[in-house]
Every structure is written in structure tokens, then in C-alpha cells.
Image (cartoon, helix red, strand yellow):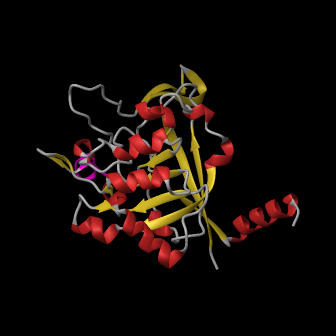
Amino acid sequence: MSPQSVLAALTSGLRSGAIEVVDLTSPLSSSTPVLQLPSKFGQTAVFELEEISRYDNRGPAWYWNNFRSGEHTGTHFDAPNHWVTGKDLADVASVPVRRLIAPAAVLDFSAEAEADPDFLVEVEHVEAWEAENGPLPEGGWLLVRTGWDARSHAREPFLNADASGPHTPGLSPECARWVAEESPVIGLGVETVGTDAGQASSFDPAFPCHSYLMGSDKYGLTQLRNLSALPPTGAVVFAGPLPIVTGSGAPARVLALVERS
């Protein structure tokens, strides 16, 4: 099949509904939950819009805004230089575009996370999934579904913090190392505020998903939603971060293509 006919088949499938486009992106607004670090550290900004004009004397025929946002606010893409382990690797504008379109494996741990918000995915969980579904996709994404997107309407349930810190699911340190160093995927996608579990500041190493993935020239996608609409295998993810020169990450529109019979 020629490249032209492949693309024609794709557009035909989109028109007919045989291929569904699933939006994995959380809407970005001033109410979007943001990561809260201990007060001694710098903090990311809450998303803000500043109106320039809205069909008025500042601009009679047009509406537009300035916006202010942290790179890691809302659904966003983590580039390797986000973490000290990847400080000499790519910024978000330098990520090869061919890596922004990739197959996805979706691992569902929503029942486990509902029972225990501190649930950690272990290597054996991934291996059990592979035994049933086949190997993780070469050059693809490992997407971890925990049902956490149901909490994204408000900061408190989403961050789920108490005196001991936030309580959200994620990967164990050993699983994070395995995904970064031994698995064939290019990155990890999660529904929580960051790729690491809520209690990851106490892990060894601290924040192992960031430490291992960024240091291995891999990527992160966070605050995804609608993973429940994706099959365990077969979806193709389009991750489109803003190409901020020297940036450590960026808000992203993340879409998935899913074949429907």
C-alpha cells in the first residue's frame, strides 16, 4: 500500500467513525489543579488569562488573551531536561516529532487505586499484563489508568493531601527504573498531577519516575483523562506540546486514535 493510500484510509476511517479520536486532555483553566511543593521550593503558576480585547474599543472586531502558565500545569509533557538526571538532554522544543506519534499500552489499575490511593505499580504487574496482552510497544507509551481523572474537577480530591503529604498512585522505584532502562517504551503517561506517586519524595531515589525516565531520554505525560475509552493495545497517541525553546516541558493537547469495529 502506497503512503498516499495509507493516509487516504486514515482520513476515510476518521470520516466514517471507524477510527475514533479520543481526547486525553484535561481542559486548562484557572481551576486546573497544580502541583504543590513544600514552601521552601519555587512553585508553578496557576493558569491565568488576561483579556486583551473582546469586540470593544480595545479591538472592535476581535477577541484574544494573553495567558500565564507554568510549563508543568494541566495536561503536560515532561522533556528530559526537566530533571537533573537529564539536564544535558533534549528540551521540549527538541523532541523529535516522530516520537510525538506513538502506539500505546493501557494498563488498568483503577480498582487497586480506588482501594488504596497509595497503590504502586510493580514490575510484576506489568509482566502480568504482558502475559495477557503481549509485549509493551516498541517506541510507544505506557499509560497507567487509575481512575484519578474522576477527581480532576477540584484541587483537594485530585492532590489528596494530608499532614503526611499527597496520596496518589504511581510506580514503585524498581518499576520506574525498569520502565526507563529495560522496557521498549519512550515514556510514561498518568492521570495524576505528576508522573510520580504522591509519596515519592520519600522513595529511594526521590521521585524515581522523573529521575529514571528523564535520565534515560524518555518522557512523561500527566493529567491525562479518558483512558477508560482506550483498549489495552492498539491505540495511537498524538502528544503535541508547545515547542518552547529551552523549555523543560509544556502544556500539551493529547489525542488517541482508536479503531472501532
Residue at position x 61%, y 59% from top?
138
Residue at position x 40%, y 42% from top?
210
x, y percent for residue 62: 60, 29
> Could you tell me how many numbered marks the image carries?
0
Closest to the observer, 46 or 65? 46
Q: Magenta span: helix, strand or loop, mainly?
A: helix
x, y percent for residue 154: 28, 49
Q: Quadrant of residue 256?
A: bottom right
Residue 156 in magenta stretch: yes
The magenta segment? 153-159
Closest to the observer, 189 or 74? 189
| Quadrant into which the N terminus falls | bottom right
Asked whether, in this view, residue 179 is left or right of residue 140, the answer is: left
Q: Is residue 34 above or below residue 238?
A: above
Residue 113 in magenta stretch: no
Closest to the observer, 198 or 30? 198
| Quadrant into which the C terminus falls | bottom right
x, y percent for residue 174: 35, 54
